[in-house]
Image (cartoon, grey):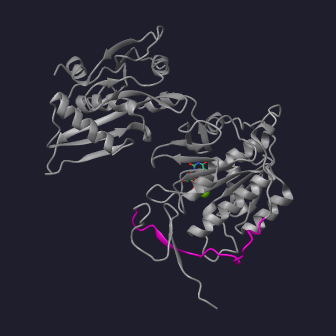
């Protein structure tokens, strides 16, 4: 018998090759190539040999038939991130660092969905049923009609699902699942891929919604191939900083709702509680206006969120000054420093720059540009921005300020939280009734002159 040929798969992008190398040629990542079980090729045959599937015309689909109703669990932060409740038969991946609170969140969600009338089963591959029960007790959920199973063998899980016919199955975690027809260890690329594939296709056929829990590796990727993300309808990340109580559930992909939607939770002694007004929470620790502190009026998904940006600028003892960013994009910071230097003549050479988004939030909007520039200048000039002012606007390479979307929502949220002024780009559509005093700026040089008198 011919020896089975070895296959190597990249755990970041899923590309396969016949030999091992330190760097994946497809995606360029280092140390991601792992040995994988070869796919069986099946008998060669001239005929395709498959079954003929059914196809229909788009116009044949009845428009009368209403889509099956979504189920809301009642935890509004979760329902919103799902796009307005759970879609029947959907597959969801929830990723996050170990210990961040995925099992806690999903056990709570399982209880709520079960109470809302969905037969729900929680399959744990990491804890025994007794341990899950203990956690449920701690969370005060012992009365919820959730079924528990401690199981890792995929075949057994699918038999259980087939017999019990739940409407929702939670699989915690996909890395502990094990398909006995795949010849490699649980948690390996091929096992994760096979388990995710089998579970999602099985669930789709039976109309069961599945939630797969996935641990994230140090560099922020779901361990196992990225392909798992392509197999599911919705990918949610559960994020948070250790030492902070806040947890953010972020939709990075959603076939049934807006991506980039966030839900904010707080980890308490009795599990996760939802935070209905995140702006108030993110700004609650704010002290008196300090140089380097600026409030940015941002939008996360469909919702305005105010966050504090903090900058520190100090003479650098190094020949290569430090640029350190938490919660924002370091490339974007470099761009803003370059624009400040080239267009406004304000150099940051020889200065260390630290930028932090308070509360462990991560911001990806370019609308934060102006707030970042304001925080940097405020820190550099040792001059504070008034405490009751919010800032937003995009900066272009020419130094011009560009208006950003949803200006009115940003202003409304600021007003709701007691802010009285805003600094925004000139062409912003501010509407009439925001009630804030709005200072409109057309370019960065004007902004620097007006606010810092430089
Ligand atoms: P867990 O849900 O087990 O994390 P994951 O499944 O993502 O690995 O959460 C574990 C952490 O949450 C642990 O450090 C303890 C903390 N925790 C609370 O603070 N309160 C609680 O009520 C529970 C159940 C956990
Ligand atoms: Mg867990």
Q: Is residue 135 left or right of residue 115?
A: left
| Direction bottom: furthest residue | 1
Measuring from the top left, give residue 398's x and y in whole percent.
Answer: 25, 29
| Front position in the image: 38 or 239 | 38
| Direction right: furthest residue | 163
> Which residues make up the magenta segment?
29-50
Q: Quadrant of residue 5?
A: bottom right
Is there any visible trace of residue 447 in the rendered image?
Answer: yes
Q: Residue at x 39, y 37 (%)?
A: 358
Q: Is residue 391 left or right of residue 26?
A: left
Q: Main secondary structure of the magenta part?
A: loop
Q: Quadrant of residue 203?
A: bottom right
Q: Residue at x 82, y 35 (%)?
A: 62
Q: Is residue 49 left or right of residue 317?
A: right
> Does the magenta run of residues contain 243?
no
Q: Residue at x 44, y 14 (%)?
A: 430
Measuring from the top left, give residue 269's x and y in whole percent.
Answer: 59, 45
Is there any visible trace of residue 187 in the rendered image?
Answer: no
Measuring from the top left, give residue 424's x and y in whole percent.
Answer: 36, 20
Asked if 74 appears above or below 96 in the picture, the reply is above
| Front position in the image: 9 or 411 | 9
Q: Residue at x 78, y 41 (%)?
A: 115
| Direction front: furthest residue | 46
| Front position in the image: 39 or 182 | 39
Q: Quadrant of residue 382?
A: top left
* Image mark count: 0
> Does the magenta run of residues contain 37?
yes
Ligand 2 sits in quadrant: bottom right
């Amino acid at each position: 018998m011919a020896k089975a040929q070895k296959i190597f798969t990249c755990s970041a992008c899923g590309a396969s090759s016949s030999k091992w190398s330190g760097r994946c040629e497809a995606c360029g990542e280092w140390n991601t190539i792992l040995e994988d079980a070869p796919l069986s090729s099946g008998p060669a045959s001239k005929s395709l040999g498959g079954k003929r599937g059914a196809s229909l015309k788009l116009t044949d689909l009845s428009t009368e038939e209403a889509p099956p109703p979504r189920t809301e669990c009642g935890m509004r932060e979760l329902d919103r991130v799902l796009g307005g409740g759970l879609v029947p038969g959907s597959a969801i991946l929830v990723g996050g660092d170990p210990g961040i609170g995925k099992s806690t969140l999903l056990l709570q969600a399982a209880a709520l969905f079960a109470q809302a009338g969905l037969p729900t089963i929680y399959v744990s591959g990491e804890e025994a049923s007794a341990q899950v029960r203990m956690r449920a007790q701690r969370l005060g959920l012992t009365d919820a009609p959730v079924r528990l199973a401690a199981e890792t063998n995929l075949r057994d899980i699918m038999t259980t699902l087939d017999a019990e016919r739940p409407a929702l199955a939670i699989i915690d975690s996909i890395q502990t699942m094990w398909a006995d027809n795949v010849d490699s260890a649980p948690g390996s690329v091929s096992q994760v891929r096979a388990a995710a594939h089998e579970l999602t296709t099985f669930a789709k056929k039976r109309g069961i919604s599945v939630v797969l829990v996935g641990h994230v590796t140090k560099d922020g990727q779901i361990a196992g191939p990225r392909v798992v993300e392509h197999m599911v309808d919705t990918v949610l990340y559960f994020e948070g900083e250790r030492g902070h109580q806040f947890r953010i559930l972020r939709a990075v992909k959603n076939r049934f709702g807006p991506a980039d939607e966030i839900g904010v939770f707080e980890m308490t002694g009795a599990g996760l509680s939802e935070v209905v007004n995140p702006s108030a929470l993110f700004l609650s620790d704010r002290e008196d206006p300090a140089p380097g502190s600026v409030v940015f009026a941002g939008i996360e998904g469909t919702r305005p969120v105010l966050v504090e940006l903090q900058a520190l600028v100090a003479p650098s003892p190094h020949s290569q000054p430090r640029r350190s960013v938490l919660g924002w994009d370091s490339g974007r910071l470099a761009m803003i420093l370059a624009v400040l230097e080239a267009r406004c003549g304000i150099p940051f050479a020889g200065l260390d720059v630290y930028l932090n988004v308070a509360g462990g939030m991560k911001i990806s909007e370019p609308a934060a540009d102006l707030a970042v520039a304001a925080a940097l200048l405020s820190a550099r000039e040792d001059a504070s921005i008034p405490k009751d002012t919010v800032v937003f606007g995009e900066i272009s390479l020419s130094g011009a300020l560009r208006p950003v979307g949803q200006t009115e929502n940003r202003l409304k949220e600021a007003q709701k939280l007691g802010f009285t002024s805003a600094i925004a780009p000139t062409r912003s559509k501010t509407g009439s009734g925001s009630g804030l005093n709005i200072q409109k700026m057309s370019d960065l040089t004007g902004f620097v002159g007006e606010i810092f008198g430089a």
